[in-house]
Image: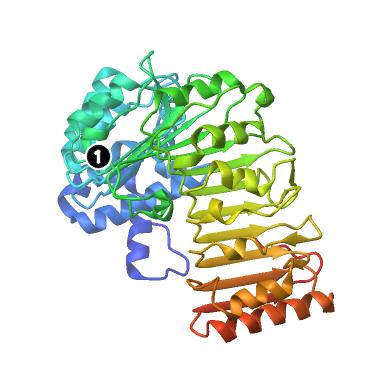
Amino acid sequence: MPVVKNPKSLVEATIKTILDNINCYGDNLTTHLAPDPRQMVLDKLLKTTYWSDSLSISFKNSWLAFPSLLSRETKSIETNTLENIFNLHVKTTSSTGAEFPILKVLQLLAEKAPNLQELIVNHSGLNSRLCRDEIASFSNLNNLAELRILRAIVLHSELKEIVENCKGLQVIEVWNLRLEGEQKIDFLNDGFLFHKIEFGSGDSISVTLDKDLSRPDNEPHDLLGPGPHYYLVGRPESVADLKFLETQPHATKLEIYCKDFKDEPKVSRFPHLPKLRCATFRCWKHKTHALECCLEENGRQLSRLAISPVNTSRSRIAAGLPLAKIFGWCSNLEWFSLENFSMPSYNVPISFISHLKYFRWFNKHDTRVDVSSVLTAPQLEDFEIGIYKLDLGDKKALFSRIAQKEILKNLKRFTVILLFKMDATNLLLQDELAAEIKSAFPDVHEFKFRALSKNLYVT
């Protein structure tokens, strides 16, 4: 029997000994090991096979021992780790051409792992579709809460079947959904409050369904109201790819990446999304036509809007689009974020920003940005900018309005980050603005005034 070198504990030494001799135990693992230690052995086995390219010959029969290691303590399984064990078994038994038996695995899990909560179907041999029996077997996993199918093609009708037959599922994730001509993805009546649908070029669509809005991955700060919410993420390559949006009238949040949008200037009309409340555009270089079409069609119902380049650290958007035009389309915005977007004008009529509460702007390209008109937004609570030079327009008039408490009455947080710290004039202007605000509104929760070195950019 091999000796465990420098074991951290007696338990570790015991687990190592069992693994090294796993082909000797047979059914004794079930009869002589309680569920807790069996699960510890299984965890170690799966971890070892996941990270090792060349497994010890002593593991050759671990596939046959796998069923004996399952228990009520088995809560999560990934099929790619089981496939590694199976492949070693195939290699050492000369079973050339044998396919990973996913149906048999599902049957074993239903029989021997009654408390299984998470199943990730991601083995590499799965490059087409699950069969009907495999789809039906998910319903036998009575306590399954999270199902993630990351490689197999799943038809829309099959996803509906899973939702219908597996009522206990809280999360369903499918990376390769095919619609079969039925374009509408609708699980409004099945308890799922969060729907993330990713589309691009071609037929493949990724879908995440979740009954819990509070999970961090669901970005709850971007979701307005109790739901259900439909979050669409698009990476279009042609105008034709936008037609998918016409079939998703429930969309409440939209994110568009324009880097590979080859014929973006040919967009004539952006699909109307009547329930859209949040939008994010990741623009590429000078391409803003799709953005403008979207805001012209859907801007009025938006509460939140974010615009940035695809790569915020290296690129910028340079377009003849003034800030007033954006707010003219989106006059109900409460939250607005802009990064590295150069504009011909930054002045905005107060009637366009009457609902604005949060304003964030980082721009490391323009030398001067006049933000004075934004400071007049009557409901402004949170103001944050990172720029090279602070421009307050008519400083005397602005400071007078602050002193008389005509503006910034609802201010809670104020942040100014100067990207050059050596400009004494700019620093003095920053200090004067801070003094005026603090004098008029001493109860503002948070002030931040910082100057950064030349090459440092804050995101």
Give the image location of residue 444, x and y in percent.
Answer: 51, 79
Does residue 371 appear to the left or right of 148 in the view shown? right
Tell which of 288 and 125 is nearer to you. Answer: 288
Q: Is residue 420 above or below residue 277?
A: below
Q: Amino acid at mark 1?
A: Pro
Looking at the rendering, in which quadrant would you find the C terminus? bottom right
Looking at the rendering, in which quadrant would you find the N terminus? bottom left
Tell which of 26 and 39 is nearer to you. Answer: 39
Give the image location of residue 381, x and y in percent.
Answer: 50, 67
Q: Residue at x 79, y 71 (%)?
A: 453
Quadrant in which residue 385 is drawn? bottom right
User: Within 10 Å of the Cα at label 1, are there few (<14), some (14-19), or many (20+) other Cα atoms?
Assistant: many
Q: Is residue 162 visible?
A: yes
Q: Is residue 20 visible?
A: no
Task: Write down the residue under mark 1.
Answer: 67
Quadrant in which residue 118 is drawn? top left
Q: Residue at x 76, y 47 (%)?
A: 344
Does residue 423 appear to the left or right of 249 in the view shown? right
Does residue 136 appear to the left or right of 370 in the view shown? left
Q: Residue at x 42, y 58 (%)?
A: 2
Give the image location of residue 384, x and y in percent.
Answer: 60, 65
